[in-house]
């Protein structure tokens, strides 16, 4: 009976030893496959967003008078020069009344000015010949100066209106010639011949007739989350891509950062504009573009995978480095820039060092200090993409 039991015990021991050897071999193979050699490389931290391509400068063209659209000279997509005629607006009855008031006020002020000037010169001549006292000359001078100020004011209003409206004193229609304020392209034509439009005043915004865009500058408008905006600065480099596979690539810089946050889908964000550099012939306003704002860069950095960096319960950051005898030991390090997949090591490692590259192997090799550790907080423990 004892011999049988001894035989079973021996067989069990051999099986156990065989399984243990196999498991150790598997761990060694896993460790060998999941190590990483520390090397120098460029690394850049980015913020990734999508935005809309818009003109850097665009204007809404409105009419200076209320009335009916007589003619429209340009269509959407057409090129336009500054000062080129866009449309003609015929003044309505109320606007014509206002125009006539401007004309009448100007003519009346002109007559009063000329009469006051003649009266003053006549009074000055009489005083020099001792026919009237000096007091009457001063009164005539005051009337002349008052008439002069009123005439200058009426003249300024008249000249301003004359730039925008072709006055017809013969009783025919008054027409406003709407012209482009800049050189560019007609993004939108919002009127048709025969429509009624209103002028822009202090009491109302007026009818928008055209949207004109300057073609000299393209920008991408994006919204940056409030938790990332502190990393965004004016002048930062930006990589802009278009197309499903990102085949269209452009360079840009951060040109404008809104000082005030807005709500977007329940999240507080800051509108940011990115100016696109270089050739933009393939771009159209309204297109969607992906942007990568480069918030930090290091061109000659020691780089390891983020899965090679760990933090213990005290917040100390470390790696598991391979020793010459094949074992691993815990090494404290200081990190710099990190991306989704890689992290810069500022101190604690040198080029050519071998480190473990995932949390499972760290547990198999042991932490070297007896304290538990996890992948670095705030960084992925696996290669799962996310924005950082």
Image: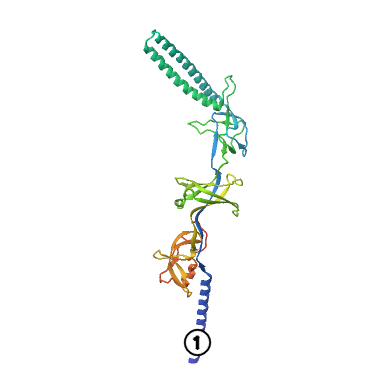
Q: What residue is pinned by disc 1?
A: 10
Secondary structure, mark 1, is helix
Residue 160 appears in the rendering: yes
Give the camera-side residue of 123 and 249: 123
350 up-or-down from 112: above or below: below
Query: In the picture provided, is 150 more to the left or to the right than 165?
Result: left
Give the camera-side residue of 64 and 132: 132
Residue 214 occupies quadrant:
top right
Find residue 348 and report its horizontal and vertical position in percent.
44, 65
327 up-or-down from 228: above or below: below
Residue 1 appears in the rendering: no
Q: Which residue lies at the image location 52% right of the left edge and 72% below the top edge?
A: 32
Find residue 107 and report its horizontal and vertical position in percent.
51, 18
Find residue 192 and report its horizontal and vertical position in percent.
61, 33
Query: From this viewpoint, which residue is outermost toward the front?
Result: 128
Q: Which residue lies at the image location 46% right of the left edge and 69% below the top edge?
A: 320
Find residue 124 and report its horizontal and vertical position in percent.
41, 12
How crowded pointer 1 is (Cα within 10 Å; few <14, some 14-19, many 20+) is rated as few
Q: Which residue lies at the image location 54% right of the left edge and 37% below the top edge?
A: 59
């Amino acid at each position: 009976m004892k011999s049988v039991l001894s035989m079973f015990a021996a067989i069990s021991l051999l099986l156990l030893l065989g399984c243990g050897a196999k498991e150790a071999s598997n761990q060694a193979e896993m460790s060998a496959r999941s190590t990483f050699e520390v090397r120098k490389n460029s690394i850049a931290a980015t913020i990734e967003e999508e935005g809309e391509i818009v003109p850097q400068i665009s204007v809404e063209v409105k009419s200076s008078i209320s009335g009916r659209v007589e003619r429209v000279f340009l269509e959407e997509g057409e090129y336009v020069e500054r000062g080129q005629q866009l449309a003609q607006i015929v003044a309505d009855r109320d606007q014509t009344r206002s125009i006539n008031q401007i004309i009448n006020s100007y003519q009346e002020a002109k007559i009063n000015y000329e009469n006051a000037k003649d009266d003053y010169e006549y009074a000055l001549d009489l005083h020099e010949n001792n026919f009237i006292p000096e007091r009457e000359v001063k009164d005539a001078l005051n009337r002349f100066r008052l008439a002069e100020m009123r005439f200058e004011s009426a003249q300024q209003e008249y000249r301003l209106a004359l730039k925008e409206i072709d006055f017809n004193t013969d009783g025919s229609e008054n027409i406003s010639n709407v012209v482009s304020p800049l050189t560019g392209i007609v993004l939108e034509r919002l009127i048709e011949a025969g429509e009624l439009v209103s002028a822009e005043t202090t009491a109302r915004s007026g009818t928008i007739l055209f949207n004109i865009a300057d073609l000299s500058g393209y920008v991408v408008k994006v919204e940056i989350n409030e938790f990332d905006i502190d990393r965004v600065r004016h002048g930062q480099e930006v990589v802009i891509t278009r197309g499903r596979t990102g085949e269209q690539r452009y360079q840009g810089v951060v040109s404008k950062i809104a000082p005030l946050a807005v709500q977007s889908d329940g999240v507080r964000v800051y509108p940011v504009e990115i100016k696109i550099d270089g050739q933009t012939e393939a771009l159209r306003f309204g297109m969607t573009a992906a942007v990568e704002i480069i918030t930090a860069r290091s061109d000659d950095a020691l780089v390891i995978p983020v899965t090679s960096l760990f933090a213990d319960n005290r917040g100390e950051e470390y790696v598991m480095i391979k020793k010459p005898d094949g074992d691993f030991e815990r090494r404290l390090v200081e990190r710099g820039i990190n991306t989704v997949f890689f992290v810069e090591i500022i101190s604690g490692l040198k080029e050519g060092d071998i480190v473990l590259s995932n949390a499972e192997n760290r547990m198999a090799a042991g932490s070297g200090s007896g304290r538990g550790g996890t992948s670095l907080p705030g960084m992925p423990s696996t290669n799962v993409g996310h924005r950082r």
